[in-house]
Image (tube, rainbow, N blue to C red):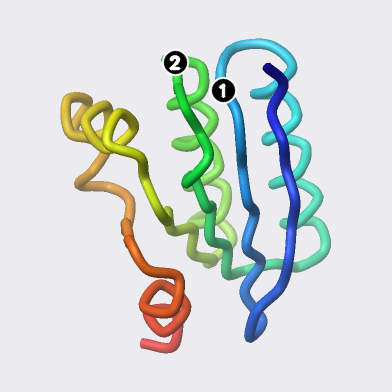
Amino acid sequence: MSMKISTREVKGISIIDLGGRLTMGESCAAIRDEIHDEIRQGTRKMLLNLADVSYIDSAGLGELTAAYTSMKNREGQLKLLNLTKRVHDLLQITKLYTIFDVYDDEKTAIASFAS
């Protein structure tokens, strides 16, 4: 199953909806390219919607971490939305849950950028 990526904008925030498996190879390259395109366009507020991501491997976690670092280095913010139980548990086990701002509700996530 290939990675599905669609991007939309709400209140100046780029929301990237992801679906499928975030694994080494094409899916990691696709999300990396999408995030870097958004950064080049000047995006400083980004929300990754992981509601339809069924699986993330170590390379996928690396991409999420690299995206977070890229945004932070440009004084931007990257937050995660709608983690599945499997992805939530993975972030807990790897202690990455403490690094990312994670939300279960898009409206709350969008409001969090204002503060």
User: Can you name the residue that lies furthest to the top here?
Assistant: 25
Measure the alpha-carbon separation of dots 1 and 2.
8 Å
Which is nearer the eye, 104 or 72? 104
Image quarter hosting the N terminus: top right
Mark 1, residue position: 21
User: Which percent across, then down, holds residue 107?
Assistant: 43, 79
Residue 20 falls left or right of residue 9: left
User: Which percent across, then down, holds residue 81?
Assistant: 42, 56
Disc on res. 107? none
User: Which percent across, then down, holds residue 25?
Assistant: 68, 11
Q: Is residue 13 above or below residue 114?
A: above
Q: Residue at x 33, y 61 (%)?
A: 104
Within-10-Å neighbours for mark 2: few <14, some 14–19, many 20+ = some
- Residue 67, quarter of the rendered image: top right
Q: Name the residue type under label 2.
A: Asp
Q: Is residue 22 above or below residue 71?
A: above
Q: Is residue 41 above or below residue 67?
A: below
Residue 13 falls left or right of residue 33: left
Q: Are marks 1 and 2 in contact (CB under 8 Å)?
A: yes
Within-10-Å neighbours for mark 1: few <14, some 14–19, many 20+ = some
Question: In terms of secondary structure, where does tag 1 sit?
Answer: strand
Q: Residue at x 53, y 60 (%)?
A: 47
Question: In terms of secondary structure, where does tag 2 sit?
Answer: loop
User: Which percent across, then down, holds residue 106?
Assistant: 45, 70
Q: Name the residue type under label 1.
A: Arg
> Which numbered disc, 1 or 2, marks the residue closer to the eye?
1
Mark 2, residue position: 57
- Say whether disc 1 or disc 2 marks the residue closer to the N-terminus: 1
Q: Residue at x 69, y 34 (%)?
A: 32
Q: Is residue 81 above or below residue 97?
A: below
